[in-house]
Image: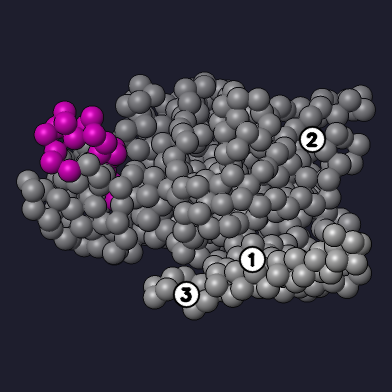
């Protein structure tokens, strides 16, 4: 074979190869079989910054829009804690991922500074974050994504959901629209957006955006386990989060807020593949209450509950696994009035199936005292439905406000649940359920503190506490206990 024959043979082989390739492509791009989902392979077009070439990203994998609309609304939060260390729940595995460090430049009383993220939810400056980011803070500062700094006012906190609401005096701010976390599906893409900027520290990041998928919903990790009314129904994702991202936004691909990033599961105190966010449906309820009343209107069904797993089902001879088992019905509760009994298995609340205590608690917590919910339950193999009118911590349907008569100098007092008294082996006491600005906050007293004595006098109800405090000026000795069993004494003067 001469060179000319070799050349033409090579051209012919190349041509035949091209024909086969095109024919194969036409074969694979033929009309899909009936029932085949073609939407998943439809590309989304966008223009690259490099040489103006067009690239394609599969539909559902383009995070650009969600990142662009959410990052300007995620802020950095700095808190100063005079003479106190971080006291939030933390251990070697489940961990809140805001962080605090000593200020070594302070020559006077020791200080620590806390860092975290927050999300602007309205153009007039309301910001939602985690309670543990600002818990016990003396001063709170906010830095926007454009580097503007503001002093923030604490509107209110809810330690039972680890949420807090701040306010800065600004207008026309970028904000994130609230989404519906109920619509999230397992396997759906989400973005975790934070602003952990902390000048002068190892975490010098003005904005972070990471992607992951929803791994689970209604997850209870017991990080609020020391709180009697702690609500945990986390969205679990594998979007990477690290110190300083606490209080940041979890958004869907529309850029809507579907959760507030709160905790990670880690053996090393760095991200290990599991992050947890408070669902937006619960966030919206809490922040609306804090804006309107200054304190959350906590609704209770009034039952002690547990999951029905295979071991428990076998132990109690329950034919099916699933639902939430009623261990005990509290006296004078919404559940008792609705006719629920010990041994009933709740399977649905307001049309939504429930299989875990976390799911049930979240569905109830979205409501306010006085709201009516529909409860579907099983008893003796048969299914029933009843309506329950939810009650507050005091056992009625009244609205608790910061300005109500059960408050004094920024602290709101309420009756302690009998179960809490029994757990702590207390004969009586009065719980502080909310603290705003005032000497209670200045002394470092936190919501959840149970007052047992005022000036050595035992107290059993709110009226006793108010009578002592309102009729005495000068120093007052406040004795009591937190719900984790820690006993504390505070000296406060008015």
Q: Is residue 277 left or right of residue 202?
A: left
Real-space Cα separation, disc 2 to disc 1, in angstroms: 43 Å
Q: Which mark is residue 32?
A: 3
> Outermost residue toward the front?
1
Nearest to the eye among marks 2 and 1: give it. Answer: 1
Could you say whether the residue bearing mark 3 is in a helix, strand or loop? loop
What are the residue bounds of the magenta stretch? Answer: 299-320
Q: Is residue 353 visible?
A: yes
Q: Is residue 306 magenta?
A: yes
Residue at the image point whose x is 59% and y is 44% from the top? 238
Residue 365: quarter of image: bottom left
> Outermost residue toward the bottom?
31
Q: Which residue is mark 2?
A: 113
In this rendered view, identify the residue nearer to me: 242 or 246: 242
Residue at the image point whose x is 35% and y is 21% from the top? 425
Residue 91 spot, x, y in % from top left: 58, 24
Q: Is residue 290 magenta?
A: no
Q: Is residue 26 left or right of residue 152?
A: left
Q: Is residue 82 visible?
A: no
Could you say whether the residue bearing mark 1 is in a helix, strand or loop? strand
Which of the two discs, 2 and 3, labels the residue nearer the N terminus?
Answer: 3
Residue 235 spot, x, y in % from top left: 51, 49
Residue 455 spot, x, y in % from top left: 52, 26
Q: Is residue 364 left or right of residue 132?
A: left
| Dot 3 crowding, Cα within 10 Å, few <14, some 14–19, many 20+ | few
| Dot 1 crowding, Cα within 10 Å, few <14, some 14–19, many 20+ | few
Q: Which residue is mark 1?
A: 58
């Amino acid at each position: 074979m001469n060179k000319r024959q070799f050349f033409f043979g090579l051209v012919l082989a190349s041509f035949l190869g091209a024909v086969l390739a095109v024919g194969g492509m036409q074969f694979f791009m033929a009309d899909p079989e009936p029932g085949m989902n073609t939407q998943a392979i439809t590309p989304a077009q966008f223009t690259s910054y490099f040489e103006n070439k067009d690239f394609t990203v599969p539909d559902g994998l383009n995070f650009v829009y969600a990142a662009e609309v959410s990052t300007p609304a995620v802020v950095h939060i700095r808190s100063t804690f005079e003479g106190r260390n971080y006291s939030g729940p933390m251990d070697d595995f489940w961990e809140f991922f805001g962080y605090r460090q000593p200020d070594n430049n302070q020559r006077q009383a020791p200080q620590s500074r806390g860092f975290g993220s927050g999300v602007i939810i309205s153009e007039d400056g309301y910001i939602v974050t985690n309670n543990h980011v600002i818990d016990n803070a003396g001063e709170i500062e906010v830095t926007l994504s454009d580097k503007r700094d503001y002093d923030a006012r604490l509107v209110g906190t809810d330690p039972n959901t680890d949420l807090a609401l701040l306010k800065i005096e600004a207008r026309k701010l970028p904000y994130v629209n609230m989404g519906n976390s109920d619509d999230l599906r397992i396997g759906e893409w989400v973005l975790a957006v934070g602003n952990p900027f902390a000048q002068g520290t190892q975490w010098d990041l003005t904005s972070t955006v990471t992607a992951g998928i929803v791994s689970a919903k209604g997850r209870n990790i017991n990080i609020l386990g020391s709180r009697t009314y702690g609500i945990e129904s986390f969205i679990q994702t594998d979007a990477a989060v690290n110190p300083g991202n606490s209080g940041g936004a979890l958004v869907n691909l529309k850029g809507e807020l579907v959760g507030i990033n709160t905790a990670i599961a880690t053996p090393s105190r760095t991200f290990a593949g599991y992050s947890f966010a408070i669902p937006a449906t619960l966030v919206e309820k809490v922040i609306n209450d804090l804006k309107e009343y200054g304190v959350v209107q906590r609704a209770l069904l009034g039952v002690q509950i547990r999951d029905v797993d295979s071991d428990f089902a076998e132990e109690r001879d329950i034919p099916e696994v699933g639902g939430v088992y009623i261990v005990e019905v509290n006296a004078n509760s919404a559940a008792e009035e609705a006719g629920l009994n010990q041994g009933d298995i709740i399977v649905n609340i307001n049309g939504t199936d429930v299989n875990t205590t976390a799911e049930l608690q979240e569905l109830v917590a979205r409501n306010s005292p006085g709201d009516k919910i529909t409860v579907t339950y099983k008893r003796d193999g048969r299914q029933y439905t009843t309506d329950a009118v939810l009650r507050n911590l005091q056992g009625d349907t009244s609205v608790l406000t910061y300005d109500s008569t059960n408050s004094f100098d920024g602290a709101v007092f309420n009756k302690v649940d009998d179960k809490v008294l029994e757990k702590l082996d207390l004969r009586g006491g009065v719980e502080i359920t909310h603290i705003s600005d005032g000497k209670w906050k200045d002394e470092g007293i936190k919501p959840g503190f149970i007052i047992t004595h005022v000036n050595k006098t035992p107290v059993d109800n709110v009226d006793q506490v108010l009578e002592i405090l309102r009729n005495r000026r000068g120093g007052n000795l406040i004795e009591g206990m937190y719900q984790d069993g820690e006993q504390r004494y505070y000296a406060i003067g008015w």
